[in-house]
């Protein structure tokens, strides 16, 4: 996969970086909040402007926020993104005066030899350009983009400027394969960001013991054995009632959406505290989404291997999470790297399991064998006759079963039937859906 040029949006908190990111991307990906400090980790996505394909990156604020305990890490992360960029969009707030620190920071980035495009946001009326723009030219730039990301004012001109500034190699990766999207989900502080950092081989995501460190979801593209993967690090999911910060609540809502949009869901449990009631709630979200599920138990390096056996842990997990017992279980350590890379291998395997299509003739051969060896029962205990089965779709694999008697199947029999179906045709790690109809 050819590396795409990177366009990185930087600026102080609340200048509208995330709004501009979403506007250029053409969809809401980066969370926008009225309170500063919503974005901590960088958020990136591939997009195309003027026929040039590139990676667009939204960053956290380059100056401290009063209630932000991770300001230094957020700023350092944003500066590191800027240093690796092909083009930096330096965003100012057009509704307030320029802060001396903003001018100093702009000149600092300029001295580093970075290619900069100065963007003044929140110019909601074009008439302002005549009376309020002179002050911005003290930065020494001839071409300044005066825009309103929220109201789409002068956005087309900015897009033309970005396309003109990008290197010609931007078109090289247009035919790149679609990556497998793996949503890394779980409670707060179970090690989700640490797992992503270990897989990419660098400290790209901010890791802290402070609960709720990750607020917005972040996409990280990696390539392994020629295959692309998109790792989606999500905010820790906890009960809304336990969350007072509106920014964290927005991140939780986004994390739940990431589950529905993923190709594979990777649920991370903490070996020191599992499975909790909240783990069960998140597993239920994965089941409801119909996405293949992998359960990862992190911090396995802290376990006394003489006293704790994997089989006992597996039994403990599925005693509470039996409704997702189809999910493979993987023991890892993000700190040491133990078995972390297997997440990618297993994600590929269970994704294939969710896309299997079975010929109708083979399904009905299976139906005949199953009903003979284990006669079906209705919920009221009466014998049932199963006439015919066909597959309706994939992701999740969905089947229509025609029943020759009125009344629902026994839940116990339906569970047995789906488990037999899974074993017969290799539906690894994916939920199955069964629609029962009376013929």
Image: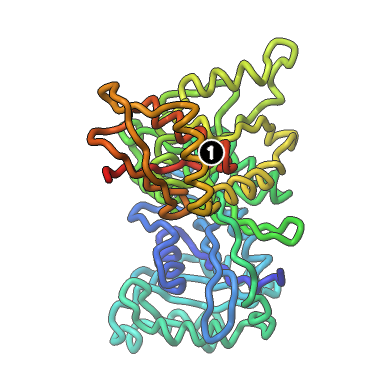
Above or below, 328 against 439 in this view is above
Q: Residue at x 74, y 61 (%)?
A: 226
Residue closer to the observer: 362 or 48: 362
Residue 191 is at least partly visible in this image:
yes
Give the x, y percent position of residue 105: 58, 66
- Report the side of 58 relative to 313 (left or right): left
- Report the side of 72 relative to 431 (left or right): right
Q: Quadrant of residue 405?
A: top left
| Disc 1 crowd, CA 10 A, few/some/many (<14, 14-19, 20+) | some
Quadrant of image for the N terminus: bottom right
Q: Residue at x 43, y 38 (%)?
A: 237
- Report the side of 216 relative to 163 (left or right): left
| Colour logic | rainbow
Residue closer to the observer: 157 or 311: 311
Above or below, 412 against 289 in this view is above
- Residue linked to disc 1: 422
Q: Residue at x 47, y 48 (%)?
A: 397
Residue 71 is at least partly visible in this image:
no
Give the x, y percent position of residue 336: 75, 34
Residue closer to the observer: 248 or 391: 391
Q: Secondary structure at mark 1?
A: helix
């Amino acid at each position: 996969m050819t590396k795409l040029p990177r366009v990185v949006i930087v600026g102080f908190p609340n200048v509208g970086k995330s709004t501009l990111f979403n506007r250029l991307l053409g969809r809401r990906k980066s969370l926008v909040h009225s309170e500063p400090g919503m974005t901590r980790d960088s958020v990136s996505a591939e997009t195309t402007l003027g026929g040039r394909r590139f990676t667009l990156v939204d960053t956290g604020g380059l100056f401290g926020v009063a209630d932000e305990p991770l300001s230094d890490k957020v700023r350092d992360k944003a500066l590191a993104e800027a240093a690796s960029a092909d083009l930096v969009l330096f965003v100012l707030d057009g509704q307030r005066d320029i802060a001396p620190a903003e001018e100093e920071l702009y000149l600092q980035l300029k001295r580093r030899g970075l290619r900069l495009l100065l963007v003044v946001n929140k110019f909601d009326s074009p008439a302002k350009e005549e009376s309020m723009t002179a002050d911005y030219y003290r930065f020494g730039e001839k071409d300044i983009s005066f825009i309103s990301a929220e109201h789409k004012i002068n956005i087309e001109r900015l897009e033309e400027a970005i396309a003109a500034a990008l290197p010609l190699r931007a078109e090289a990766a247009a035919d790149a394969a679609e990556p497998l999207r793996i949503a890394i989900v779980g409670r707060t502080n179970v090690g989700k960001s640490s797992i992503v950092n270990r897989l990419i081989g660098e400290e790209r995501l901010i890791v802290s013991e402070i609960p709720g460190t990750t607020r917005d979801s972040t996409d990280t593209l990696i390539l392994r054995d020629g295959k692309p993967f998109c790792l989606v690090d999500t905010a820790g999911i906890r009960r809304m009632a336990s969350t007072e910060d509106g920014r964290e609540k927005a991140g939780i809502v986004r994390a739940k959406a990431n589950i529905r949009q993923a190709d594979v869901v990777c649920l991370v449990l903490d070996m020191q505290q599992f499975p909790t009631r909240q783990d069960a709630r998140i597993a239920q979200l994965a089941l409801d989404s119909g996405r293949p599920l992998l359960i990862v138990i992190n911090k396995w390096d802290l376990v006394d291997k003489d006293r704790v056996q994997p089989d006992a842990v597996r039994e403990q997990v599925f005693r509470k999470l039996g409704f997702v017992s189809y999910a493979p279980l993987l023991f890892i350590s993000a700190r040491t790297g133990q078995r972390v890379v297997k997440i990618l291998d297993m994600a590929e395997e269970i994704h294939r399991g969710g896309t299997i299509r079975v010929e109708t003739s083979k399904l009905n051969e299976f139906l005949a064998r199953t009903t003979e060896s284990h006669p079906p029962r209705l919920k009221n205990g009466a014998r049932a006759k199963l006439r015919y089965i066909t597959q309706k779709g994939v992701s999740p694999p969905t089947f229509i079963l025609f029943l020759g008697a009125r009344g629902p199947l026994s839940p116990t029999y339906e569970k047995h039937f789906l488990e037999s179906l899974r074993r017969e045709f290799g539906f690894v790690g994916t939920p199955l859906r069964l629609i029962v109809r009376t013929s």
